[in-house]
Image (cartoon, helix red, strand yellow):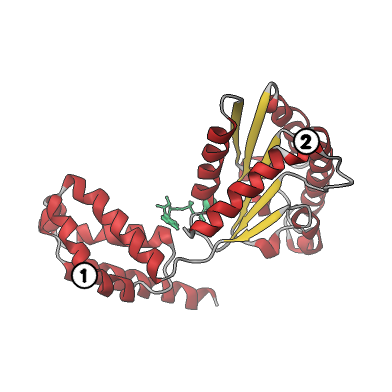
Amino acid sequence: MDKAVKDRLVAQATLALTVRRAVSFDVAPLHGLIVLAGVPGTGKTTLARGLATKVAAMLSPSKVNFIQVDPHGLASASLGKSQQQVTTLFNQTIPEAGMGGFAVVLLDEVETLAADRKKMSLEANPVDVHRATDAVLASLDLLTRQHKNILLIATTNYPQAVDSAFLSRADLIEYIPPPNNEARAEIIRDTLEGLGRQWPSIRNLANDMSLFVAASSGMDGRRLRKAVVSALAGSIATARDPNLVTSQQVLAALKASTQANKEVGREAA
Ligand SMILES: Nc1ncnc2c1ncn2[C@@H]1O[C@H](COP(=O)(O)OP(=O)(O)O)[C@@H](O)[C@H]1O
Ligand SMILES: [Mg+2]
């Protein structure tokens, strides 16, 4: 992950939890909301958790609670229920977590929680989802004005499906791109090193990094790690003794994964 992105996030989080308390909302209209947007597998959830850890270290010795909200759990509640659950979450659970210190809240895959109300006509439960989004926005406004010790980090794989009123409340929207050549090399190296701790010969494969980078163009971080690991299944012999894995097998695994990605993309299109 680009260091500039990380620094920007830490700076914004610090602002949200310190400067925001010192001035009124009219002067500095900060909601304490950071949004990480990008295609699946680019490390948004991991980054959000890492940011929470950084924030906690920075605010030490103050108490910092971390909450991760899975909106799929909320939205799957039966008709009419999700609105109530959202209200309880924002008006009670989250403020309580911040009592006596700070709270960092990860709203993962927030498109489910704050679905775009303009696009609801195609949904199975349009009225309920509409109400849930309204409840999120109303509760969000209340929460961010009354509790300036709370930082919300939202991630989304589909920013175009998130209600624009939610996005407009973000203090910072950070677009997380798929890994470039340099980033892919780092992810591959990290994966090889991790495997190399168990099977030392695997470390030598890093010598062919330029080939791996070229073969993995367009892949996201998650697919990339999986592809490298799946090279171990290149043959029964390597699955039994991963020390035997060759560069050709890693290359083949990367190519197979890229090809599968393309096929799936073509079907979806
Ligand atoms: N930029 C990256 N650097 C290192 N690993 C990554 C990166 N992006 C994704 N990954 C790998 O993919 C996995 C899934 O990442 P995740 O944070 O869940 O992505 P997202 O939330 O964007 O779908 C991570 O556990 C990590 O192993
Ligand atoms: Mg995620």
**In the drawing, does residue 178 fall left or right of residue 100?**
left
Relative to 209, residue 135 above or below: above
Using the image as rendered, state which of residue 264 and residue 220 is in the foreground.
220
- Which of the 4 quarters of the picture holds residue 156? bottom right
Under circle 2, the secondary element is: helix
- Mark with earlier residue (2, 1): 2
Rendered residue at 57%/24% (across/down): 61
| Label 1 lies in ligand 1 vicinity (Cβ under 8 Å) | no
Under circle 1, the secondary element is: helix
Task: For marks 2 and 1, give the one nearer the viewer.
Answer: 2
Residue 76: tell me if it is visible. no
Q: Which quarter is ligand 1 in?
A: bottom left
Q: Which disc, if any, is residue 21?
A: 2
Rendered residue at 17%/71% (across/down): 248
Query: Percent x, y for residue 224?
Result: 36, 62
Residue 63: tell me if it is visible. yes
Give the residue type that dot 2 points to.
Answer: Arg
Residue carrying label 1? 208
Query: Percent x, y for residue 201?
Result: 12, 55
**In the drawing, does residue 115 fall left or right of residue 72?**
right
Image quadrant in which the C terminus is located: bottom right
